[in-house]
């Protein structure tokens, strides 16, 4: 188990997650709390260590898979959302039963909307993008 501050950002400096200056994160390695490539960066770091990693596109969150982008009829999507939910491009949705036959819940980003359907991207928002990963290890248990 690790207690740490970490920052996950795009190469241009835009933060995706940043715990520095806020409450630190506590993670257990091997439990999929972080992407495997990010976890591997943490292995061997000792308490008090700080590190900076630059992961190339496709590395941290894998390659972007065009087959994980689906157009869904609005009528089907509305069965999974509250009646008063307005859907717009850029919205992040947590959906069950649309992306997986097992009914498992999955996150999706709305990438297009028209009168009849909504295009959903089930890829991780950072899939296929290079990322910067800065860490400061506060505690190791």
Image (cartoon, helix red, strand yellow):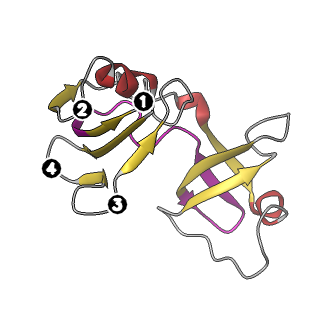
Q: Residues within 10 Å of mark 2 (few under 14, many from 20)?
A: some
Residue occupied by mark 4: 13
Q: Element type at marker 4?
A: loop
Q: Which quadrant would residue 110 be assigned to in this image?
A: bottom right
Residue that protrudes farthest toward the bottom in the picture:
84
Residue 28, given in percent of the width and then of the height, sits at 49, 33
Q: Quadrant of residue 53?
A: top left
Nearer the observer, 98 or 117? 98
Q: Which residue is mark 3?
A: 23
Please give the residue where the numbered disc 2 appears in the rendered image. Answer: 47
Q: Is residue 10 left or right of residue 3?
A: left
Q: Residues within 10 Å of mark 3 (few under 14, many from 20)?
A: few
Instruction: Say which residue appears at 75% left-offset and 62% top-offset.
Output: 74
Q: CA distance from mark 3 to mark 2?
A: 17 Å
User: Which type of secondary structure does the marked residue at label 2 adopt?
Assistant: loop
Looking at the rendered image, the quarter that the N terminus falls into is top left
Residue 59 to residue 108: above or below: above
103 shown above or below 43: below
Reading the chain from its start, which is encountered first: label 1 or label 3?
3
Residue at point 58%, 63% (across, down): 113
């Amino acid at each position: 188990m690790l207690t740490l501050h970490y920052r996950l950002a795009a190469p241009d400096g835009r933060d995706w997650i940043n715990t520095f200056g806020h409450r630190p994160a506590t993670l257990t390695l091997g439990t999929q709390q972080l992407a495997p490539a990010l976890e591997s960066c943490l292995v061997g770091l000792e308490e008090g260590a700080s590190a900076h990693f630059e992961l190339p596109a496709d590395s941290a969150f894998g390659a972007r898979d065009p087959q994980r982008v689906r157009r869904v009829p609005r009528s089907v999507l509305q069965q999974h959302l509250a009646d008063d939910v307005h859907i717009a491009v850029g919205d992040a949705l947590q959906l069950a039963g649309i992306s997986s036959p097992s009914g498992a819940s999955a996150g999706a980003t709305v990438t297009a909307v028209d009168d009849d359907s909504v295009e959903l991207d089930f890829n991780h928002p950072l899939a296929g993008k290079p990322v910067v990963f800065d860490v400061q290890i506060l505690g190791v248990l």
